[in-house]
Image (cartoon, grey):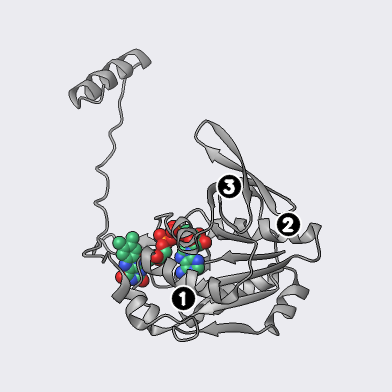
Amino acid sequence: MKILVCVKQVPDTNEVKIDPVKGTLIREGVPSILNPDDANALEAALAIKDNDPNVKVSVLTMGPPQSCEMLRECLSMGADDAYLLSDRAFGGADTWSTSNTLAAGIRKIGDLDIIFAGRQAIDGDTAQVGPQTAQRLDIPVVTYVQQVQVIGNKVVVQRQMEDGYELIEVQTPCLLTAVKELNEPRFMSIYDIVDACGKEITVWGHEDIKLSPENCGLKASPTQVFRSFTPPTKGKGEMLNGTAGEMSKSLVSKLKGLHVI
Ligand SMILES: Cc1cc2nc3c(=O)[nH]c(=O)nc-3n(C[C@H](O)[C@H](O)[C@H](O)COP(=O)(O)OP(=O)(O)OC[C@H]3O[C@@H](n4cnc5c(N)ncnc54)[C@H](O)[C@@H]3O)c2cc1C
C-alpha cells in the first residue's frame, strides 16, 4: 500500500503578535512549523505502516525551498520519502491553484492508495485544499476524520460531527482529511533525525509536473487578496461591583440594553 500525506509549512500563529502602536502583525522571529492537522495526518499514515511493513509513506508539499526543513521533520518522524513542489510560478496561489498544483504532483507520483491532508491549515484557514485536490483527482474524499481503519482495499473511517460521528466505508484510492482528535503525533528520535539528514528530497518545478505557468500560482488563481488588515482590538472590559444579586441585575439590564437578550 502507498500512502501520501500533503503537508504545509505554516507560521506558528500562537507566536504571531500585534504591534500595539502600528496595529500590524509582528512576523519577525516567528518560527515556521509543520501545520498541526498535517502532523495528525502523518501520524495516521505512520500508524498504518507500523502494522504493515509493506506500507510506504511519502510526504508532499508545495512551497518555497525552506519547506525542506519541515519535510526533513516528516522524514525524521518516519516517512519514507519526500517531494517538494517549488517554483516561482507556483507563488501567490489561492486554494484553487494550490490544489491544481498538488493534484499534478500527485498524478506524477502515481499509484497511491490513500492520500491524507489536514482538515485545515492554521494560516490560510480555509479547509478547501483537501476536498479540491480530491475533486481534481476524481477520487472520493472524507473530511474531519477522527479514526481510520484499513481493511483490504477499503478504509473505514469515523467522520467527526458536532454531536457524534458518521461511520463511513470508502474504497481506495481516496483522500482523507485529519482532525487533531485522530491521534497524538509521535516525537522524532535522535537516530531518526540523523538518518533523515541523509535522505534526498525530490524537487519538482512546473515543467516536471506538466503544468504551464498560466495554470499555476497567482495567474491561475480565481481569487486574489484585495486587502488584509489587523482586526480592531476589543474595547475595555467593565467590572461590576456589589452583591451577587446586584451584579446579576446590573448584568441583565446591560445585556438587555445591548439587545443581546
Ligand atoms: C482568497 C485567497 C487568496 C490567497 N492569495 C494568496 C496569495 O496571493 N499569496 C499567497 O501566498 N497565499 C495566498 N493565499 C493563501 C493560499 O491560498 C493558501 O495558503 C493555500 O492555498 C492553502 O490554503 P489554506 O492555507 O487555506 O489550506 P487549507 O485548505 O486550510 O489546508 C488543508 C490541508 O491541505 C493541505 N495543504 C494546503 N496547502 C498545502 C501546500 N501548499 N502543500 C501541501 N499541502 C497543502 C494540508 O494538508 C492542509 O492541512 C490565498 C488564500 C485565499 C483564501
Disc 1 residue type (three-letter): Gly
Q: Position of residue 33 (x, y in %)?
A: 53, 67
Q: Position of residue 117 (x, y in %)?
A: 54, 59
Residue farthest top in this picture: 245
Tell me the SS state at disc 2.
helix
User: Who comes first in sequence, dot 2 or dot 1?
Assistant: 2
Q: Residue at x 43, y 66 (%)?
A: 99
Badge number at residue 145: 3
**Which residue is labeled 2 in the image?**
47
Measured in 3D between alpha carbons, the distance from the residue under mark 3 to the one under mark 2, in whole angstroms, is 15 Å
**Which residue is labeled 1 in the image?**
63
Q: Residue at x 54, y 72 (%)?
A: 107
Tell me the SS state at disc 1.
loop
Q: Is residue 94 left or right of residue 229?
A: right
Q: Is residue 223 left or right of residue 118?
A: left
Residue farthest left in this picture: 257
